[in-house]
Image (cartoon, coloured by chain):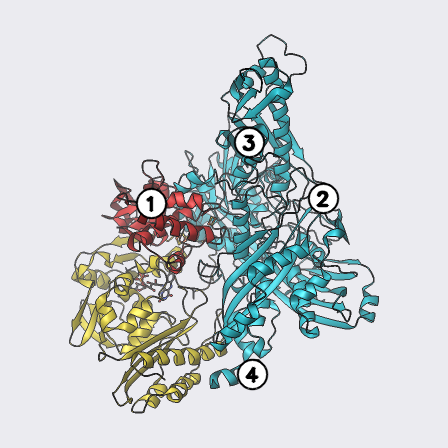
Chain colours: A red, B yellow, C cyan
Amino acid sequence: MGKQATRVMVNGKSYARVVDARLTLADFLRHELNLTGTHLGCEHGVCGACTVLVDGRTARSCLMFAVQANGCAVTTVEGLAPDGQLSVLQQAFIDNHGLQCGFCTPGMLMTLTELLGDTPEPSEQDVREALTGNLCRCTGYAGIVAAALDAAQRLRGTVAKPGSP
Amino acid sequence: MDRRVEPGGDDVGPMKPAPFEYHAPRQLKDAAELLARLPNAKLLAGGQSLVPMMNFRYVIVDHLIDLGGLDELRGTAVVDGALRIGAMTRQRDLEFSPEVARQCPLLAEALRHVGHRQTRNRGTMGGSLAHADPAAELPAVCAAYDATVHALSVRGIRQIAFREFCTGFMATALAPDEMIAAVDLPIWRLGHGHGFHEFARRQGDFAIAGAAALLDVGADNVVRRAALTLFGVAASPLRVEAAEAQLAGKPLDAAAIRAAAAAAWLIAPISDIHAGGEYRRHLAQVLSARALNDAARRAGVEA
Amino acid sequence: MGAKHFGARVTRLEDPALLAGRGRFVDDVKLPGLLHACFVRSPHAHAKLRGCDARAALIMPGVHAVMTADDLPEPMRDTPLPLLLPNPALNVPRTQTALARGEVCYVGQAVAVVVADTRYIAEDAAAALVVHYEVLPAVADCRAAAEDGGPGAHSDLTTNVASTFSLAYGDTDAAFADAAHVFREELWQHRGGGMAIETRAVLAHHEPVSDLLTVWSGTQTPHIGRRMLADLIGRDLQSIRVIAPDVGGGFGPKAIFYPEEAVIPAAALKLGRPVKWIEDRREHFLCATQERDQYWDVAIAVDGEAKILGVRGRMLHDTGAYVPWGIVMPYIAASTVPGPYVVPSYRLETVVVLTNKVPTTPVRGAGRPQAVFAMERLIDRVARELKIDRTEVRRRNLIQPEQMPYEVGLMFRDGKPLVYDSGDYPRGQDKALALAGYDDFRERQEAALEQGRFIGIGLANYVEGTGLGPFEGVTVRVLPSGKVAVATGATSQGQGTRTTLSQIVAEEVGCRLDDVVMTVGDTAAISQGIGAFASRQAVNAGSSAHVAGQAVRQQLIALAARALGVQETDIDLEDGVATAQRGNKPSIAFGDLARLAQGIPGVSLPAGQSAGIEHTAYYTPTQAAYCSGTHVAEVQVDAMTGGVKVLRYTVAHDSGRVINPLIVDGQVQGGVAHGIGNALLEWMQYDANAQPLTTSFADYMLPMATDVPTCAIAHVETVNPLNPLGVKGAGEGGTIPAPAAIVAAVEDALSPFGVRFAEMPLTPERIVATLRAAGAYDRLFAG
Ligand SMILES: Cc1cc2nc3c(=O)[nH]c(=O)nc-3n(C[C@@H](O)[C@H](O)[C@H](O)COP(=O)(O)OP(=O)(O)OC[C@H]3O[C@@H](n4cnc5c(N)ncnc54)[C@H](O)[C@@H]3O)c2cc1C
Ligand code: FES
Ligand code: FES
């Protein structure tokens, strides 16, 4: 019951698959495409670990079915550093101790990638508000907030590469 | 996410949805036809409430009709003195819509409290109204504006006054074969004031209680029209008519606002694991006063 | 130590892979033929099992097996899981069996497991399984359960009291009889969870050719897990390998050996295929162990100058349905009360009560947050009643640095007398207060009040026994590639174990940080290990890394001296090269030395040279290492809604010598966030039938980015004399005093109304109800 063809562009690469309609986008990415950087922390939409970009906007991949992404462009954490070169934001996470266990990190990066894209000069409050959609149990958020502000500054100071932060 | 459905029954485990057939109609009439024809079918809008419930298997459907491909259901327009909002308009698009900010500033303000940017990117106007969570902001705003819901089915389009739309705890006046196509929010006179206050435990959580206020104040400082809606305190959004009646036709000042807010004390509040009724009643009064104060200030009255 | 790496703010070696989405968590491991498991769990808090009908489930396409207790191998079938920490005071040493037999005693207890092609299908089949239950009365409230005559949490037991014990020294009766003042407080602390963002996970695979059973598990303690699994499944240790790959947070609950860690390997063996189980979040709420949940009735006796004469009282600990870690949390709680203060006499009666809830085991802080809450609330009470500043009452009672080492008079849970090794508590408190701007706070408070804002400040002190034994091991080995391989039984759930140990080894051995290749959390890498809990790894594994590194350094020097024909004292080791500080400074790379150390086949090694360059050290601490600190919280309270915002948070922390300030500060900040959750948000609620009510992240509220300010952190480094590095643990100090400091701050903010609070979490609803009872709203609504 419920098999469906879906064609999704993920990190610039097109994939066509026939999947169960009930397969969530998160499980599709993780288990069909083996893009395991997208994590699942709750599967009910609160923790944000599964956050990806769908057509450039953040979305919970646990609350979408893969078939809904038919014809969409999806970006996952693997797409942030395609050539192995970490993005400015990723580097800022290292420098500001923005991660501990790293499990929430991919979701954090996707949220902040969107934020820095639409708000190049975010205030600390802007960053914190955006991050309410992502839970982190390890860091107490300080390093993540610092990394976001640091990355924003670096991106303003440099000519933004296409596709970055 | 729906926080009200408690675990129960004999299923303690699931976090993956039960199987279903997926339909992605491209035409509105096809969607209506599918909804009329398919047994045990549900509409999928932004999925931010429905999919968690499917993952928990609180909701098990045989057919899922995805409204995502229906461009006709997206967008805003001013029609006959009302702001018409297509059911599939994403909350995030409304949040940044200059038209919403200009015509229905109360809605713009309320949207910032609806979940998080990540859920607003997907969540829709129609989904929120159909889901009818008692603590949801958007139904409260519709109640404040006396909105009109356009319900579409194979039988045609029916208009439902918002007063009649919410029929109980997460229940609406929609027939099983009906879907929301759009909602009309009557536009208040330019220069009216709005106020929106809620108390949630954390940013983006469903509110424990909230209040939405609209005030139209004449040059003589006399209130021409008032709307005060509470949410989170009862099975569905609640217009505090006693407060509105007290305000209307009288000069607006601090005492009037205090008295109107005190009318919120008369509600019969609900209790759940998030808060008891007494506390909700208290918040209703506090937040009503705050919302009315903001509305008064924006209407040019320092109360 | 000529610190090049040690003590430096080194960025973490773990980060690049995790940031690129190349972490390897259990669910990222893919094996051919992999099957997926779903557990069938009790929906009842207490019930007799009356059989199970799996027929409908078994005929579903894609379903491979349904197993109940009867299908498990011997002795797992009916042997209770091991009790990790036996204690003579534990009268009812009850643990659960891997799958329930006869009776279920909490909602979520595993009854059966379904194995299928996908998790989706396994869940379909689980829903089709029919389990017959005969529902029994459930025990939900430990206060009622402690009394005789009520229903039992286990139907075969005549009591719900698992243990009663008393920790005491000095003459409390005399102290209280003579005291100028006695104050009593009744306090309650909620139940909460670790709530790592990665849930638990187990993947088991049996490889018939080598007869090796490999288990990937999201555990803090792989070596302990292997030992327990070996016992339950009847295999030798060396035929089992447990790997804890990247683990997404631990915080205590992943230090337990769980039923799933036994059942999944059993299923893999039975089916001859790899089987994976990923806990879902709701299961985590139901089945992962929790903590706090204590009721305290305590009193303090002081003289006219606010000097403490004694503390005594009674504490009730709701331990849940089983005691997998014995009575360790109530024991730690009871022994933590005196804390950094001179308390001449002390007696606490503790009653550990079984209920029909998921078992409790240590969660970040392990009993200490409760004890600190009790002690600090008492001291605040003394200050208020005697009208002395809270900081001054503390100052008068703090143990002075000259009194170190300080013998408290109790036995700690490590079986050793509670002796604080080192510390400067008054300096810590002063530092924290200065950083927090305590002196001008009253002015700020008044200014705020004039604007109608209620702000308040609170502080709390604590001492924490960290670095518990018995041991941890580290092997350091120089490879022919010139890399330095390090293996340890220590594990990492985000603490930066790799980075920290690499710093220590690189410092000792004289190599680049990048040249250290580390294996953590793999039982194949080192024969003995314990794992992560009780902030023990910096002390235990850190010391072992230091000792092993030193030994390898010696070996390198000896070999290099021989190879270069110079004295050993002439050799310098740096960046992976041994250089003779003579003549034209001849040098030899570590890789070449490693090859030399292999010798030549058939030729004897020179006298005194051992095979290879390698050393394994198992550091065994003689006792716990006592870290300490002072926290200062500044909050704003919306008196009308009860909403609390933490505006500013200051920590002065003594974790001994700091190996990496970046990592230690991160641990403190993360711990504080957990403490803010405990103080204001997190509350695992149950109804009167012990049905859990808060089983989603919407209902059980973790702190968000808007709830946690960036802390100001000061380090007070007093060197621990008992280990070679001088370090103490740092993982839990952020959490322990936070609720005490925050609740005190809320009280201070609302001081115009004279309200008091005695529980955590302190909810807005409670604040409003308390203000209402105090008549505050007559004033506030009028204003
Ligand atoms: C973490 C989190 C926090 C949240 N916080 C809030 C909050 O603070 N306030 C709040 O209001 N909401 C909140 N939500 C829910 C909100 O995001 C949802 O957008 C909203 O409740 C439902 O909208 P949707 O478009 O996602 O609808 P869906 O989830 O797709 O659908 C919801 C229901 O409406 C029905 N439906 C959808 N569209 C139609 C239609 N056109 N006609 C008839 N029936 C229809 C569906 O069949 C379903 O029963 C939160 C969600 C999450 C995950
Ligand atoms: S896994 Fe999707 S929000 Fe938690
Ligand atoms: S780094 Fe572990 S959850 Fe955020």
CB contact under 8 Å: marks 3 and 2: no
What numbered label is drawn on residue A76? 1
Reading the image, the residue beneath label 3 is C506
Callouts 3 and 2 on one subunit: yes
Callouts 1 and 3 on one subunit: no
Reading the image, the residue beneath label 2 is C623
Q: Chain of mark 3?
A: C
Tag nearer the camera, 1 or 3: 3
In the rendered view, would you say C775 is above or below C405? Answer: below
- Could you say whether the residue bearing mark 2 is in a helix, strand or loop? loop
Callouts 2 and 4 on one subunit: yes
Mark 2 or mark 3, which is nearer the start of the sequence? 3
- Count of residue discs: 4
Distance CA(mark 4)–CA(mark 3): 64 Å
Q: Which amino acid is tagged 3?
A: Ala
- Could you say whether the residue bearing mark 3 is in a helix, strand or loop? helix
